[in-house]
Image (cartoon, helix red, strand yellow):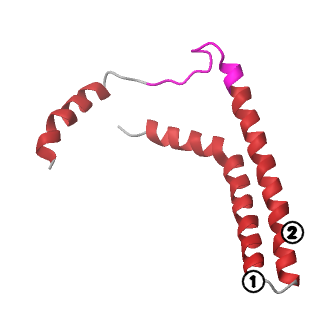
Amino acid sequence: MVGPLLPLIRTGRVLAGIVSLNPSPSALPGHSTLERLASGLAWWALIGSLVGLVLGAAAWALGSHTNNYQYSSSGRRAVLVSALAALVIGAAPEVINFLFGAGQSIH
């Protein structure tokens, strides 16, 4: 299976020494607008997570008090998913920076 891909692999190795990537926020116009847009989207996502957490907790409590297993289970799942979404949103910049750094160390 590697046989047909061998020319592409050789080309990739040659280009690996030529091509470089150095992210710079000042490289393109509008970088501050894009950063504000990303921050605004993260804020809306956090608000969505908060609403999901509150509604899920209410459904979980209501389902538990009325002995409705399905309602309780759905509420618990909503609480967990909303909490994980908030965790991922908060950790996203560090995760991206870590993965980019790990990618830069590959030679």
**Where is 29 relative to 100, above or below?**
above
Report the magenta residues as a range: 21-34
What amino acid is at disc 2?
A: Ala
Q: Quadrant of residue 13?
A: top left
Image location (x, y in percent) of residue 98: 56, 43
Tag 2 residue: 58
Label at residue 9? none
Q: Residue at x 14, y 50 (%)?
A: 1
Q: Residue at x 76, y 65 (%)?
A: 79
Q: Is 51 left, or right, of 7 in this rendering?
A: right
Q: Find out whether residue 29 is within the magenta segment.
A: yes
Q: Quadrant of residue 36?
A: top right
Q: Secondary structure at mark 2?
A: helix
**Where is 95 relative to 29, above or below?**
below
What amino acid is at disc 1?
A: Tyr
Q: Find out whether residue 84 is within the magenta segment.
A: no
Image location (x, y in percent) of residue 31: 65, 19
**Where is 68 relative to 102, above or below?**
below
Label at residue 69? 1
Mark 1–mark 2 distance (CA, rounded to whole Å): 14 Å
For label 2, the crowd category at 10 Å Cα-Cα, with few meaning under 14, some 14 to 19 and many 20 or more, is some
Q: Quadrant of residue 23?
A: top right
Q: Nearer the viewer, residue 88 or 16?
A: 88
Whether residues under marks 1 and 2 lie with C-beta atoms below 8 angstroms apart, the answer is: no
Q: Residue at x 77, y 47 (%)?
A: 46
Image location (x, y in percent) of residue 48: 77, 50
